[in-house]
Each structure stands twice: as C-alpha cells, then as structure tokens.
Image (tube, rainbow, N blue to C red):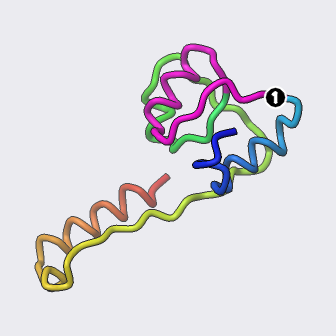
Amino acid sequence: MNVAQAHYPDVHWLQQRYPQSRTVFTSSSRTVQAQMCAQGLGVAVLPRVLGDSVPGLRLLDEHQPPPGRDIWMGYHRDMRQLDRLRALADLASGMIGAG
C-alpha cells in the first residue's frame, strides 16, 4: 500500500471488504483510478459523477456506502465578500453535494 494514501478512510474500507487482495498500483488521482479500473486493474471508491462518466466501469453494490471525503475550498479573506465568489462556492457545493 502507498503510505501517502494510507490515512484515507476509503482505503481502509476497501481493505476490510477485500482482505485477500493485493495492491497493483496507487494513485491519488481519481481520474487515473477510474481509468485503471476501467482497464480491469482493480476497484476504487469514486465519486458517482466520475464513475458514471467512464465507460467500462461497473458500480458494485456493497450494501454499505463507502465513507465520504470532505472537500475544502480556500480563498483569501479579502475575497470573502465578493458576490461572484459566493455564487461559485454555492454552485460547487450544490453540484458536489448532490451525489
């Protein structure tokens, strides 16, 4: 296992479900994970919007949803009052949280 991803809850979740499996590759890129899974190289916990858009992927029903991940948006405090930034943050939150 790649130590860089060892702290992610979804890595532990997968290890619990597939304890006899072995790691064949690691990547912090969800897009790379999706592409490798589409080529038959393993399983990954992916956002639905990504998984649904990559041909060759199959959604597995594990009867228990994988853990989520927090997403942080950072910006300079001087920009806090900008209406267009607030609109972007609201739009992104709605799109990401809609899964």
Q: What stretch is highlighted in magenta?
A: 21-42
Side (left or right) of 83 relative to 96: left
The picture quadrant where one finds residue 77 is bottom left
Q: How many labels does the image show?
A: 1
Q: Could you classify mark 1 by the number of other residues whose Cα lies within 10 Å: few (under 14), some (14-19), or many (20 or more)?
A: few
Residue found 54% across the figure and 19% down from its top:
38
Question: Whole-percent x and y of residue 45?
Answer: 61, 41
Residue 26 in magenta stretch: yes
The image position of residue 49, as x and y in percent, is 44, 41
Instruction: Answer with left or right where residue 80 lies relative to residue 53.
Output: left
- Quadrant position of residue 93: bottom left
Q: Which residue is drawn at 19% across and 70% down?
A: 87
Identify the residue at image location x=48%, y=32%.
Answer: 52
**Is residue 66 shown above or below 58?**
below
Task: Tell me what residue is drawn at x 67 percent, y 24 percent.
Answer: 24
Picture quadrant where residue 89 is located: bottom left
Dot 1 lies on which element? loop
Left/right placement of residue 64 relative to residue 53 reads right
Q: Quadrant of the N terminus?
A: top right
**Up-down: is 41 above or below 75?**
above
Q: Which residue position is annotated with label 1? A: 21
Q: Is residue 80 above or below residue 50?
A: below
Which residue occupies the foreground of this view, 74 or 62? Answer: 74
In the displayed image of the protein, which residue is found farthest to the front? 3
Judged left or right of residue 78, residue 96 is: right
Image x and y of residue 8, in percent: 63, 54
- Amino acid at circle 1: Ser
x, y percentage for residue 22? 78, 28
Foreground residue, 34 or 91?
34
Q: Judge whether residue 65 is colored magenta.
A: no
